[in-house]
Amino acid sequence: MTYELYYWPTIQGRGEFVRLALEDAGADYVDIARGREQDGQGLGAMTALLEDPAIARPSYAPPFLRDGDVTIGQSAAILLYLGPRLGLAPTHEADRIWTHQIQLTVADVVAEAHDTHHPIAVSLTYEEQKPEAARRARDFQANRIPEYLAWFDHVLSRNGGRHLVGDAVTYADLSLFQLVEGLLHAFPGSTRRVLADNPKVAALHDAVRRRPRIAAYLASPRRIPFNEQGIFRRYPELDL
Amino acid sequence: MTYELYYWPTIQGRGEFVRLALEDAGADYVDIARGREQDGQGLGAMTALLEDPAIARPSYAPPFLRDGDVTIGQSAAILLYLGPRLGLAPTHEADRIWTHQIQLTVADVVAEAHDTHHPIAVSLTYEEQKPEAARRARDFQANRIPEYLAWFDHVLSRNGGRHLVGDAVTYADLSLFQLVEGLLHAFPGSTRRVLADNPKVAALHDAVRRRPRIAAYLASPRRIPFNEQGIFRRYPELDL
């Protein structure tokens, strides 16, 4: 069965956490909104599903995943579902929920990173909330990035250093890689300084980047470059 | 087995979503940080667990739940674990993940509601970010509360109107009740107007409030009143 991923076609965003899991597993999937309209794909196919009042279980927002009759939204919930199917989650329930707990903490950082350029409203542009963004971005770099990366480093240390959970790669490892990628893009100066204090996070980031399927994906046109429409944006005036 | 809930003892906060599930199920639990130090409880027992470097799977922040050897943090992950054990989640995997997806969307609204009084930094007080809070709270009431509650109303409508998932109460119903409680406390004027447009959400809120164990809990000293240390705060200058 081919998985169908529905997400904005021009950004990494929250969909990227799902893309990385599918790519690392070598899964058969279609990134629907990036497909061609004549194939029944494209952005229109996604918005039709989001807005169709007949859909029994609509997602509030992309990303969402279709697997046959099942449709799942919220990136962490998608990974909860995909993890065991892709060999990217442990077997036992308590281990799976711990993996998911880590993913939810990644999602918290992602939401905070987004709000560094949108501290007031998603309905406004960055340019309409620049002074507030500068203030929030300062605190995020001074306090939040250090606090969160120290926690991930501690979790890695307590588990032997190489993986967040167990002795094999899980989707949580891939997601921490992506979080660090995003932070390095948006706040290169301060993130590099924090990584120097959290060497296990830095090492995990390097190790995931070298995984053959991830390396191939990152070098492919399937990997959308970071840009100033996504969650992690480089506004040089915000980097400390 | 007695469940041990660890959460800040003076606020509803994110822990309240867990308390409501435990209370509605009549579960045997202890709210550890509200207990007495001479019983090995109290705030010190919670911070000791949070800060103990020997803990293999530390939570980033409260709430967390202990069930024997298992410790779980992140309120949505706790409910994912408790749901089937308390009879507050459906049986089939796809239904359980849909219930969780709804909970994650509740969590998104909760985070946005928190940031109406803390749009810049959790390390600052409300008084240190009042102009930004006023701006964010305006957008939250004008755009976000209507968008989110319309989505919940649509989900209820698509499922027959009485429950968010299936034909019985799940933790998602209890959480939507708590979300509406919080919004009514923080933003009474605008929330009442939005509820008038979303009658199924309003009806679910009323129905959950009347459930015998919930009604008994709300009338008991176990229910901490809303206050200006929690997530949902009433600052009259922010209500539209």
Image: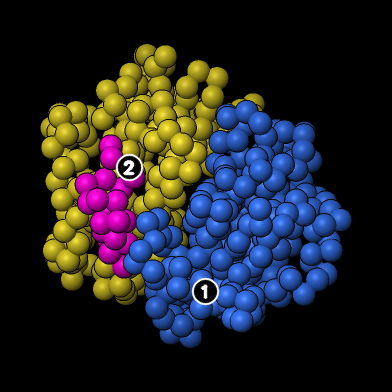
Chain colours: A yellow, B blue
What amino acid type is highlighted by mark number 1? Ala
Residue A239, above or below A19: below
Residue B10, percent from left and from top: 62, 77
- Range of residues picked out in magenta: A147-169
**For the point 39% across and 78% down, which residue is it?**
B123
Q: CA distance from mark 2 to mark 1?
A: 28 Å
Q: Which mark is residue A166?
A: 2
Residue A175, above or below B112: above
**For the point 28% across and 64% down, which residue is it?**
A150
Q: Which mark is residue A86?
A: none
Whether residue A151 is in magenta: the answer is yes
User: Mark 1 — on which chain does it sit?
Assistant: B
Residue A192, percent from left and from top: 14, 62
**For the point 71% across and 63% down, which residue is it?**
B181
Residue B154 location, quadrant: top right
User: Mark 2 — on which chain does it sit?
Assistant: A
Residue A181, above or below B142: above
Query: Residue tagged by mark 1?
Result: B45
Q: In this rendered view, identify the residue nearer to me: B240 or A60.
A: A60
**For the point 39% across and 50% down, which residue is it?**
A102
A4 on left or right of B217: left
Q: In this rendered view, identify the residue nearer to me: B194 or B34.
A: B34
Residue B90, percent from left and from top: 67, 34
Q: Quadrant of the C terminus of chain A?
A: bottom left
Q: Classify mark 2: helix, strand or loop.
A: loop
Label 2 crowd bin: few (<14), some (14–19), many (20+), radius 10 Å: some
B27 on left or right of A100: right
